[in-house]
């Protein structure tokens, strides 16, 4: 009778061990897939931030060139026109009042 219980017990252990290994491998596969998705998402964010950083560097270079230049009247005129809405004497301003599409 001892011989009959041993193969069944061994078969149960083998099944449990196999099931455990399959579950462990499944867990690792799911974890790796989740990490890959997270990495791709963060790479996208990194690319956006790098693009914004480069644009800011270009803007800083333009502004630094204006600050370093001797003639600041062009810059002051540009700011007066764009931000304050000023016009030069004798200029005519036309406004487009057609409805937008």
Image (cartoon, grey):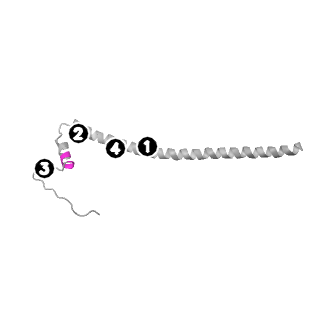
Q: Are marks 1 and 2 in contact (CB under 8 Å)?
A: no
Q: Which residue is mark 3?
A: 88
Q: Are marks 4 and 1 in contact (CB under 8 Å)?
A: no
Alpha-carbon distance for marks 1 and 3?
45 Å
Q: Earlier in the sequence, mark 1 or mark 2?
A: 1
In which quadrant of the rendered image does the N terminus lie? top right
Mark nearest the camera among 3 and 2 is 3
Q: Are marks 3 and 2 in contact (CB under 8 Å)?
A: no
- Residue range corresponding to the magenta coloring: 79-83
| Quadrant in which residue 61 is drawn | top left
Q: Which residue is mark 2?
A: 66
Q: Earlier in the sequence, mark 4 or mark 3?
A: 4
Q: Nearer the viewer, residue 23 or 47?
A: 23
Q: Which residue is mark 1?
A: 46
**Left or right: residue 18 compared with residue 60:** right
Q: Main secondary structure of the magenta part?
A: helix
Q: Which mark is residue 95?
A: none
* SS of the residue under disc 3: loop
* SS of the residue under disc 4: helix
Q: Which residue is mark 4?
A: 55
């Amino acid at each position: 009778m001892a011989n009959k219980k041993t193969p069944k017990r061994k078969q149960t252990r083998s099944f449990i061990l196999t099931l455990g290994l399959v579950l462990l491998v499944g867990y690792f596969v799911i974890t790796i897939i989740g990490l890959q998705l997270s990495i791709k998402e963060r790479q996208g964010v990194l690319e956006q931030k790098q693009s914004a950083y480069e644009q800011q560097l270009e803007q800083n270079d333009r502004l630094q060139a204006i600050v370093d230049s001797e003639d600041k009247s062009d810059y002051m005129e540009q700011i007066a026109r764009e931000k304050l809405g000023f016009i030069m004497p004798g200029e005519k301003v036309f406004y487009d009042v057609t409805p937008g599409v």
